Amino acid sequence: MISHLTGRVWTDDLSDRVGERVELKGWLHRLRRLAGVSFLILRDARGTAQVVVQDPELVERLARLQNESVIGVAGVVVAEPQAPGGVEIHDPAVTVISEADEAPPFDLYRPVIKAQLPTILDNAPVALRHPRRRAYFAIQAASMAGFRSGLHDLGFTEIQTPKIVGSATESGATTFALDYFGKTAYLAQSPQFYKQVMVGVFERVYEVGPVFRAEPHDTARHINEYVSLDAEVGFIENEYTVMAVLTDTIASMLAAVERDAAGALALLGLELPKVPQPIPDVHFLDAQAMITAATGEDLSNEPDLSPANERWLGEWAKREHGSDFLFVRGFPMSKRPFYTHPDPERPGFAAGFDLLFRGMELVTGGQRLHRYQDYVDALVGRGEDPENYAAYLMAFKHGMPPHGGFAIGLERWVAQLVDAPNVRETTLFPRDLNRLSP
RNA sequence: GGCCCCGUGGUGUAGCCUGGCCUAACACGCCACCCUGUCAAGGUGGAGAUCGUCGGUUCAAAUCCGAUCGGGGUCGCCA
């Protein structure tokens, strides 16, 4: 069976095979009929190839096929300056592997799909075949690979933690409840507790997996199921250790995108951002003060940054530091979850950070509490019963080092990277308030 | 969830404010034919929508009003 795969020639290999007779397989991207010659554009997972068809009978056969029919083309690779990419297939024999029943709802062979986002999403199984859309997900795949390899190289171990959990983890964030053999269970909104527990095992762990948020938000940057790139590391000095790991990780992701998704970058005409060493950082209070000084907006009672504030800071970082990235440290403890470690020098503020990427919150991270008694105090202080967190707290009762970590929103990362105005564009099959299918 | 906006053939739009000439227009796709090299090909012709749904106003509604369903933007919140 493997020989069927290894014998396959991809469209992006043709320039190395001039003069050879090869067999391509793929989709009928477009047939351009002219009087004396016709051009069949075949698309496979790697790109497209131009096939020159002169036999009138073959043209007639092809003309009866709808676009997206699956075909095999055997022919000779010829160097031809007039052809897109400099090579084309001559003297073709075409086999129809699987005929498409209908024309696609929109043209896949145009530079961009001319349809609105809801139409594109409703037709995702076809829309994703468009080279530009496919490029987004090639970048996504490369980003995940870079996240994994970067952390692996730093001695991290990949883990997989349960997505069906018995109790709503972080109070506040809304969870999806489900029936679990007659008991109520929840879809995990974060691997937070488990990855911390696993620091007691591997010291350095990461996870790539889905998280579920039942918040009824309906914005261009929220979806209800997304991929979280999580990491957690033990024996840190403070949040700056975590920020350094994150900075390395982002750099690894970008390096992987540059290496593995070069074709996608070229197609999209993208320039990758540089990761400054170190990424500039600003304290929450200083950030607010700058915004107030610049805009006159009174933020003195705001415990958080608004999307508009984040955009302002993104522009500031670009202007003042030439950076697409900016750390904002020291958010008020009141807005952070109970496991957050306070800044020893400013106890009302967290030893944690958000990473803004081009003016959007991309990552949240920081140092966590690590002493059992601190957890009990934090929970009681928030009116929660530590008993409800017994399994989680067991790790701390039995000794945990100072540790911290972060979580990157994968779809947001790609959306910012490719300058997509809506995170749904960089989600294969987005789940939101109104969309459960496809 | 609050506020704002939108809903016209397969797709994207025009028309709506200033009801009637709309038996609804344009572009792309689709179908037919033409054109020795296209590459978002080009040309000619054709099919395809009773204008989200329900109700109201009016001699007359895609166009005005109400309800309802669907969608978009923004804010809260977050990744």
Image (spheres, coloured by chain):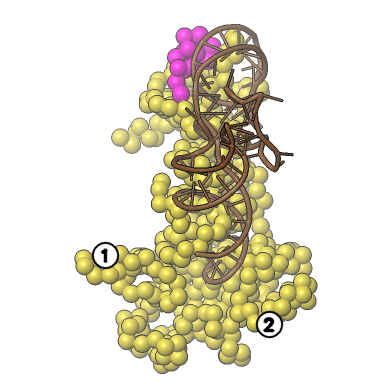
Chain colours: A yellow, B brown
**Residue at x 72%, y 64% (from the top left corner):** A315
- The type of residue carrying mark 1 is Asp
Residue A187 is one of the magenta-drawn residues? no
Instruction: Tell which subunit mark 1 falls on.
Output: A
Q: How far separated are the C-alphas under marks 1 and 2?
A: 44 Å
Q: Is residue A399 visible?
A: no
* Span shown in magenta: A53-66
| Classed neighbour count for the residue bearing mark 1: other residues with Cα under 10 Å, few (<14), some (14–19), many (≥20) | few
Q: Position of residue A105 (x, y in %)?
A: 49, 33
Of A332 and A345, nearer the camera is: A332
First in residue order: circle 1 vs circle 2? 1
**Residue at x 42%, y 88% (from the top left corner):** A383
**Image position of B51 (left or right of A197):** right
Of A416 and A87, nearer the camera is: A416
**Residue at x 45%, y 53% (from the top left corner):** A434
Q: Position of residue A180 (x, y in %)?
A: 25, 66
Callout 1 and callout 2 share a chain: yes
Q: Quadrant of residue A292?
A: bottom right
Q: Quadrant of residue A54?
A: top right
The disc placed on residue A179 is 1
**Residue at x 52%, y 56% (from the top left corner):** A411
Q: Position of residue A19 (x, y in %)?
A: 54, 21
- The type of residue carrying mark 2 is Ser
Relative height, residue A372 to residue B32 (above, below): below
Relative height, residue A52 to residue A386 (above, below): above
> Which SS class for mark 1?
strand
Of B38 and A305, nearer the camera is: A305
Q: Is residue A298 visible?
A: yes
The disc placed on residue A300 is 2
**Image position of A327 (left or right of A426):** right
